[in-house]
Amino acid sequence: MPADNRADSATCAILDAAVAEFEQHGFRRVALDDVARRARVSRTTIYRRFAGRDELVAAVIDRENAALFADIAHELRSRRPQSNYYVEAFTLSIMRFRQHRVLTRMLADEPGLMLELAHQHWDAAIERMAGALRVIFPDGFADRIGATAIDELADTILRYAAMVLVLPSRPPLSSAEDIRRFATEHFLPSLPAALRAVPV
């Protein structure tokens, strides 16, 4: 097996083990020794790929977000939205995040860590969301509105999503219909006029 494939295999094993450990023990309480044991690698192998636990946590979150956004994009692309694409992308993002075991564990146990990671990796999160939006939109729509508008939309979705996920609300935003209504009343009017002017 080529060296690169071995490296990829070890990295995947480490990330998979870290996900399992984070899910079981929380993000702050996981020891790299436990991750190494579960992944069947040495601590040295982990440190060759990640500078420390914080970098490993960031890599796990990035990988889980990438998979989450890809799932959201696939689901929206394959079904007919119940409202418009902006509202539906927002609603589905919230619902899928709440169903994600590791990300919801982080939100429940370590909301401060979520904010810390957001500060460190906001650009990457916007890039992931923008990529998902390009898949979600009908053919040709992304080209019509341009890259800047897509990035602005991704940024707005993530900011409102953080608000809904972190802060309490009255009335509660429990169901997809609750979130869809919130998105229609608050999120949608906040979008740049250039976006709202172009029908999806």
Image (spheres, rainbow, N blue to C red):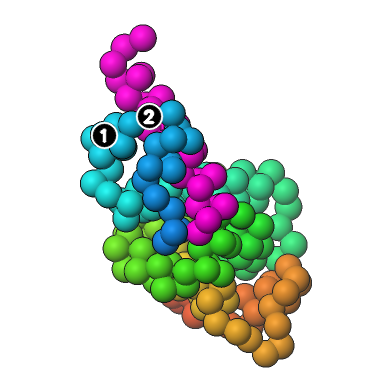
Give residue 41's mark.
2
The residue depicted at 69 percent of the width and 72 percent of the height is 180
Q: The residue under label 2 is which amino acid type?
A: Val
State the residue in front, 89 or 166: 166
Is the magenta region chiefly helix, strand or loop? helix
The spot of residue 102 in percent (x, y) is 55, 54
Decide: is 142 above or below 13: below
Give residue 170's mark.
none
Q: Mark 1 = which residue?
A: 44
**Quadrant location, the C terminus:** bottom right
Q: The residue under label 1 is which amino acid type?
A: Thr
Question: What's the CA distance linking mark 2 and mark 1?
Answer: 8 Å
Q: Is residue 22 magenta?
A: yes
Callout 1 crowding tier (Cα within 10 Å): few <14, some 14–19, many ≥20 = few
The spot of residue 71 in percent (x, y) is 59, 46
Element type at mark 2: loop
Q: Is residue 56 magenta?
A: no
The spot of residue 15 in percent (x, y) is 43, 40
Element type at mark 1: helix
Q: Quadrant of residue 98?
A: bottom right
Q: In the rendered image, is residue 140 in sight?
A: no
Q: In the rendered image, is residue 167 in sight?
A: yes
Count of labels in the image: 2
The residue depicted at 57 percent of the width and 76 percent of the height is 164
The spot of residue 113 in percent (x, y) is 40, 68
Q: Quadrant of residue 188?
A: bottom right
Magenta range = 1-26
